[in-house]
Amino acid sequence: MKIACVQMDIAFANPMENIRIIEKYTVEAAKASADVIVFPEMWNTGYALEQLPKLADENGEQTKKLFKRLAQKYKITIVGGSVATRKKGKFFNTMYVFNMEGKMIAEYDKTHLFQLMDEHKFLEKGTEDNIFDLGGVTCGGVICYDIRFPEWMRKHTLNGAKLMFVVAQWPKKRIDHWEILLQARAIENQCFIVAVNRVGSDPNNEYNGHSLVIAPWGERLLNGHTSEGIFYTDLDLEEVEKVRNTIPIFKDRRKDLY
Ligand SMILES: NC(=O)CCC(=O)C(=O)O
């Protein structure tokens, strides 16, 4: 599975410009024969939370139309980062996943809202997990702050996920937490993690990428460091079973105790 990780800058409060960037990177990934492309968190608006009433995507319609068209045209699966949406008058931070036939296979609202960036003042919490199938591989997807909740990632791996996608706008000042938490989540769940963060800045934060791909044994297969651009990785998903057979944590865990 060849995966394209898009470590992009995000134009603040400018969805049209961000759509242009998304399309540009999708063309580039298709030319490189990637199977899957992954975008960062809230790529349509950035953290322009106060402007959501005028900027949020109503029922995600604009994003869904875009992803359907791009997935079909370029024959690529889209793990769509996340976008600011409005549903029934409330705002959410929503991930959409489209397969290469252009069919939507997942919709997930971020479940843990990050108070330090004021999400709780503007957004609603999601209530469902996020499991989907990519060519016979069970995958999961979470958003940024969600990775601080090991129980949430564990729930996805207990439900079969062998590959977890993480999309983020994780600021530079806590980038060491990002790297350590992701590596721990991969090791403790014995799964692949593909984690995409943005670069650039907004009025409140600076972002320095460090998109990571981590193997189930914990090796870092890719680090986007600080550059803006697209990074590719090829995953051998059989690694998951090998690691799970070597140290069988899913068999050894004490369901009778916790
Ligand atoms: N956008 C986010 O959820 C940021 C999470 C974050 O920075 C953290 O430290 O956690």
Image (cartoon, helix red, strand yellow):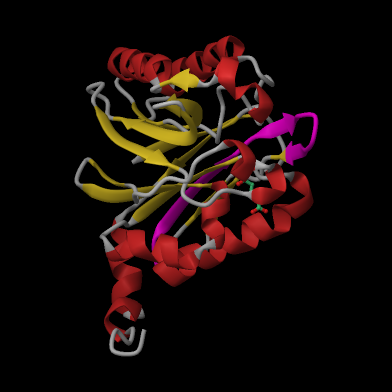
Position of 12 compared to 80: left or right? right
Q: Position of residue 152 (x, y in %)?
A: 43, 61
Give the residue displayed 36% in from the left and 80% down from the top.
247
Residue closest to the far front: 89
Vertical position of residue 44 compared to residue 137: above or below: above
Residue closest to the far left: 136
Q: Position of residue 168 (x, y in %)?
A: 58, 42
| Magenta segment, prevailing SS (helix, strand or loop) | strand
Q: Is residue 52 in view?
A: yes
Q: Is 110 covered by the magenta stretch?
A: no
Q: Position of residue 176 (x, y in %)?
A: 71, 58
Q: Is 200 covered by the magenta stretch?
A: yes
Vertical position of residue 77 compared to residue 249: above or below: above
Residue 107 image-quadrant placement: top left
Q: Which residues are magenta?
A: 190-207
Q: Position of residue 131 (x, y in %)?
A: 29, 48
Viewer-nearest residue: 128 or 132: 128
Give the residue displayed 58% in from the left and 15% down from the top.
54
Residue 101 image-quadrant placement: top left
